[in-house]
Image (cartoon, grey):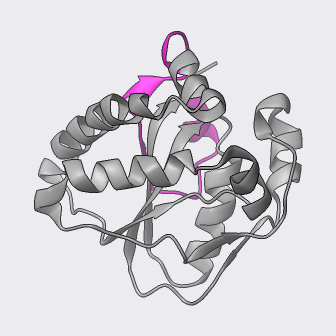
């Protein structure tokens, strides 16, 4: 656990990321997100899958994977959802685990400005109430998949919804997280 998590525990239960969000990983993720370099997803997913296989040797696997969704306007602009593609790559790499993907449970209802340009306080405000659930989840343990976790505002907002709806455990699976400050 990082110092920030020790001071103020997050809503989610675990955050698993094989890399820190710093060079060269930050550049690779930006190439995927903004320059359609989709061939870079599989090698990044492979590193995450290896970490997950090791981590869950001594722990219970989630029942499903939930990709953090893009707003439909951003999806139209970009033409693809990098987090959904990452989730699908993980499913193929973790084939022995029989994990489902539910890409319809979480809906992004507010089209907000990109988080990367905002500080931590603005990110939390920007993402507040930006998501809804399409129905009550049927799982007790889920993996919420995102490409990068910086302040944790997005994954915390979704975790809050999931836990209010009866999900007991939310693990975050991400390629990278922001280094501890």
- Indicate the position of residue 120 as horizontal and vertical percent values: 80, 36
In front of the other: 153 or 41: 41
Q: At 21% across and 63% down in the image, what residue appears? A: 60
Q: Is residue 52 above or below residue 101?
A: above
The C terminus lies in quadrant: top right
Where is 37 relative to 146, above or below? above
165, above or below 80, in the image: below
Whether residue 84 sits left or right of residue 77 in the image: it is: left
Q: In percent of the image, x 25 and y 44: which residue is there? A: 52
163 relative to 8 in the view: left or right: left
- Tell me the residue at 10%/59% (across/down): 96
Q: Which quadrant holds the N terminus?
A: top left
Is residue 21 visible in the rendered structure shown here? yes
Q: Position of residue 57 (x, y in %)?
A: 12, 49
Residue 161 counted in the magenta span? no
Q: Position of residue 15 (x, y in %)?
A: 45, 45
**Residue 1 visible to the viewer:** no
The magenta segment: 1-25
């Amino acid at each position: 656990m990082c110092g920030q998590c020790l001071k103020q525990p997050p809503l989610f239960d675990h955050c698993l990321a094989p890399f820190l969000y710093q060079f060269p990983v930050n550049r690779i993720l930006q190439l995927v997100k903004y320059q359609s370099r989709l061939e870079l997803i599989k090698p990044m997913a492979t590193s995450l899958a290896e970490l997950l296989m090791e981590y869950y040797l001594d722990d219970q696997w989630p029942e499903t994977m939930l990709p953090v969704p893009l707003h439909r306007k951003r999806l139209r602009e970009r033409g693809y959802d990098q987090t959904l593609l990452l989730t699908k790559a993980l499913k193929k790499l973790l084939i022995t685990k029989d994990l489902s993907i539910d890409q319809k449970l979480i809906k992004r209802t507010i089209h907000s400005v990109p988080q990367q340009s905002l500080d931590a306080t603005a990110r939390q405000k920007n993402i507040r109430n930006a998501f809804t659930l399409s129905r009550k989840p049927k799982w007790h343990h889920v993996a919420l998949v995102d490409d990068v976790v910086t302040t944790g505002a997005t994954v915390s907002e979704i975790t809050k919804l999931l836990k209010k709806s009866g999900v007991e455990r939310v693990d975050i699976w991400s390629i990278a997280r922001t280094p501890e400050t």
